[in-house]
Image: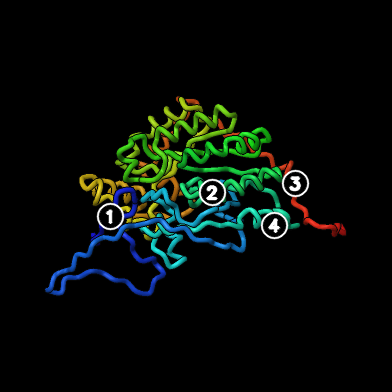
Amino acid sequence: MDRHTVRTGRGAGSNPAGRFEPTRSKAADDGWGILEEPVPALTTTVQRDLARSIIARNKSPDVPFDQSINPYRGCEHGCVYCYARPSHAVMNLSPGLDFESRLFYKPNAAELLETELGAKSYRCSPIALGANTDPYQPIERTYRVTRSILETLSKYDHPATVVTKGAALIFRDLDLLADMARRSLINVYISITTLDPSLKRTLEPRAASPAARLAVVRKLADAGIPTGVLVAPVIPVLTDHELERILEAAAEAGARSTRYVLLRLPHEVKRLFRQWLSDHEPLKAAHVMSRIHALRGGRDNDPRFGTRYRGEGQFADLLARRFDLAVRKYGLDRDLPELDRTIFKRPTADGPQLSLL
């Protein structure tokens, strides 16, 4: 395993080069020893990302939405398993520590959204927030990009979905979400990986605690906002035994629906996850990877549509049966209500010039 330093409050243990970098470096002992330099403090930096478009389109057959918005690049929550980490390599940054400490926000997101919603070719379809990085990560408190996007969607009666591991900041937007829910414009999924606080502290160090996320479910449900729980990711050996307990807790908190996603290890994530296992769960590391290989056809990752989220083989079938039984037992077999696309109002250009059509 590569030399690296475990940092409290960070998920990744290193900052490996992205897959597009032309060079790699590795410390080696040339007979004079390897100089041990002090590890510098790691601070979070945030930069402007002046995007030219804001709505991302998706045609994947196993994804339940075709439009999404990512208010931020990178994610301060620092979940070591995050499948979005490889996206930082496109910016010549590391999917490791860079992903959780070198962040970008989109100050013109609401303006771009209004422009794109006003295009004559635009067809209304629910927009997913949280499909890549978390829309309610800590920097949202300062930059309020997610809030501005939701305000724009609400203004034009446009449906949306939210997935988050956050807590306090979604409470801030309770008024807006409740208002959208009254018009059937919003569904929210809270993502819960584990109910074990000690495991959460290293696995997803800056995300809200399990108890705080269940409190979010309860508060949203009490406010009349359709709320579900996403058990994601299910990690073999480490968290799969918690599946039924998570669903029971979700039902008690007021969740109406649930889904699960099996751990994915695309591109650079597989290396970071192996480092994390070596640092935090060394006695279980071999067992975890053996089970992952059994689910992924002998590989660390299986990118194929249809199997990438659920896996294949006996363990995948058993997990699916356990999930189905628990869903029925705890009354989580209800779909969240269908979002209303019919009331969408297309933005019109400001100014005295009237449309000729």
Q: Observer-nearest residue: 113 or 125?
A: 113
As drawn, the label of residue 126 is none
| Rendered location of residue 136, percent (x, y) | 50, 45
Quadrant where the N terminus is found in the figure:
bottom left
Q: Disc 4 and disc 1: Cα gap in Å? A: 44 Å
Of callouts 4 and 2, the N-terminal one: 2
| Rendered location of residue 349, percent (x, y) | 77, 56
- Which amino acid is tagged 1? Gln
Of callouts 2 and 3, the N-terminal one: 2
Of callouts 3 and 4, the N-terminal one: 4
- Which amino acid is tagged 3? Lys
Of callouts 4 and 1, the N-terminal one: 4
Residue at 55% x, 27% y is 222
Q: Which residue is mark 2?
A: 63
39 vs 157: above or below: below
**Left or right of residue 95: residue 48:** right
